[in-house]
Amino acid sequence: MANHEAESNSKPSTVTSEARNREKWAEEPSESQSQHKDFIREIVAEDVRQGKHGGQVVTRFPPEPNGYLHIGHAKSICLNFGLSEEYAQGVCHLRFDDTNPLRESLEYVESIKEDVRWLGFDWQDHLYFASDYFDQLYQYAVALIKKGKAFVCDLTMEQIREYRGTPAEPGRESPYRNRSVEENLDLFERMRQGEFADGEKVLRAKIDMASPNIHLRDPAIYRIRHASHHRTGDRWCIYPMYDFTHCLSDAIEGITHSLCTMEFEVHRPLYEWVLSELEFEQQPRQIEFARLNLGFVVVSKRLLNELVEGGYVDGWNDPRMPTICGLRRRGYTPESIRRFCDKIGVTKYNATTDPALLEHSIRDDLNRRAQRVMGVLRPLRVVLVNYPEDKTEQLEAVNNPEDPSAGTRLVPFSRVIYIEQGDFREDPPKKFFRLMPGGEVRLRYAYIIKCVDVVKDPDTDELIEVHCTVDFDTRSGTGQAQRKVKGTIHWVSADHGIPAQVRLYDRLFQVQDPTDVEEGEDFKKNLNPNSLETLTTSIVEPTLNQARPGDRYQFERQGYFCVDTKDTGPDHLVFNRTVPLKDTWAKIEQKQQR
RNA sequence: UGGCGAAUGGUGUAAUGGUAGCACAGCUGCCUCUGGAGCAGUUAGUCAUGGUUCGAAUCCAUGUUCGCCAGCCA
């Protein structure tokens, strides 16, 4: 992907080199590590203490390669990889659960690998595919048949559903349940040979049709699919089901703790049944935790796909998408996502997390790391009437007040500058500390100026420019600079600034739970019509002519922005707003209006 | 009305029979050449009802509410 190449070309002068960042901030203890252990870490610690699994900790992240990873997956990735990193001998496998050729593809395995790596995790040489176990899985199925614990069933899908019963009533046994071992063996082999059509037969575990747990009512473990698989091609026309595959893959790999989400809790008895019937001595322990729910977001592949297909967003990596690639393009750092996952914790409670916590994580991270820069989003022309026409000064500006080692830079200043439209009010409300007729304001790193005139279009009465005088005694950094004014605003020299497109993103949905709609209504009705505002007349300081795709900056007084990796060209700078700075004035003004 | 799981401030999460704490959000101040950051302070909580106990968020009982399960998906 072109945008990823662009990212790796980023200059090290800003927050771009993930490897370096990892190193630099790896020292920070995560809250979960320094404070207390979640219930899963407690179980693992206790198992290690008791010497279970020989004291080993082996976890795994087992995605199905059928879609892009999203923030919900990040929780699982951080848990599985993070947990394994806490033990000297710990290791976490990356295993693709690729047992359904109809939905999976290589494209997804590559994007998943990239996202996990980008998040900062390392599976070393433990990259696995369930499809690599197809031969073994087949043999295990045969073993089950030989034990009389599995049978080939000729019932149709509809019939199986009828026979299954309901949660409240027991199911009925299939008429094919008592076929002989020999017949089952023969039939299963012929299934593999391709003698039957899709759906004609299925291999089922023989457990208990009366179990209150529906997953134990003779679940299907192998189905016929005459489909070519992205890794095994046409070698197979039967494919194992999740419940059969997952536990065995875990056991084959020597997983000690198999962490999954709550909806698999009811599958656990089946997980254990398979491993016990197949007589595994060291059985992995499945532990369930609650998946992440983020407010104002949808995460299901179907819904996300609808947004992509319908053109509501600019692809899977649209900066408003909750996908990892979307967050990356938005400007989120891997560290901020990991910190977020630390902070939300791990429990069995089905909680919904406030996106403000995610935003706090990225602000917190970028505040310490992002270079400061001045950019005017909505320019208003200001003429400094007593400043010489041909003069340019280079003013020293601090790159990051949180990090003295980031140094300083020079910013050109001249007679005509741009300031933010919102930083001037002809008729200012109370507590407005910025520029107003007759009023004074400090230009960041420059002079105190005073507004002496306002120029308007005679026809439209529209504000065209304001005239100000400079107080030459107040230049920043000089002895006379001590005079104080209430406000300081940012600016860009008109002659030196460079044009940029700036995209202001807001939440994609207007409601906490976008899927909560009336019967017959569509979740898209909850879309935020103002989730994207594109500004085409923004002007940024010349420092940014060295900005590279993926670079992150703080535009002072505005927010954190990153150079878009997709649409930025050689002479076309595009910035995505990752997150705005907290805006106290906006709050005050809101209250005043109420 | 079957099974499984879960309920602690607005949100997320601690306290493992002994002072209900932390973070986010909110609110007050202080500070500030970013109305950012920082600092200080503050509002607000144990689902309900019983019981056990010197003592219960924690144990027991009953109830309530919420989530998940009837794919040849994972």
Image (spheres, rainbow, N blue to C red):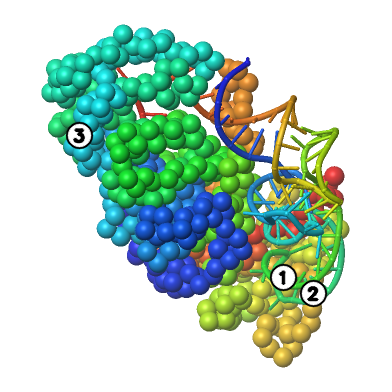
Residue A565: % across, % down: 40, 55
- Position in image of residue A485 (x %, y %): 79, 74
Residue A316, percent from left and from top: 42, 41
Compared across the picture, whether A420 is left or right of A436 comes to: left
Residue drawn at point x = 67 percent, y = 82 percent: A476
Q: Separation of disc 1 and disc 3 at Cα? A: 74 Å
Q: Are marks 2 and 3 on the same chain?
A: yes
Give me the chain letter of mark 3: A
> Label 1, on which residue?
A488
Task: Output the chain of dot 1.
Answer: A
Determine contact: label 1, label 2, CB under 8 Å.
yes
User: Distance between the Cα atoms at labels 1 and 2?
Assistant: 8 Å
At 53% from the left and 65% from the top, the residue drawn is: A553
Q: Are marks 1 and 3 on the same chain?
A: yes
Residue A231 seen in the current view: yes
Residue A99 lies in quadrant: top left
Residue occupied by mark 2: A485
The answer to whether residue A328 is seen in the rendering is no
Front in this rendered view, residue A13 or B14: B14
Say which quadrant the C terminus of chain A sits in. Answer: top right
- Residue A396 occupies quadrant: bottom right
**Which label belongs to residue A249?**
none
Q: Residue furthest bottom?
A: A479
Above or below, comparing residue A59 to residue A132 in the picture: below
Q: Amino acid at mark 3?
A: Gln
> Which is more toward the observer, A454 or A515?
A515
Give the number of the mark in front: 1 or 3: 3
Q: Residue at x 61, y 63 (%)?
A: A35
Above or below for B53 versus A483: above
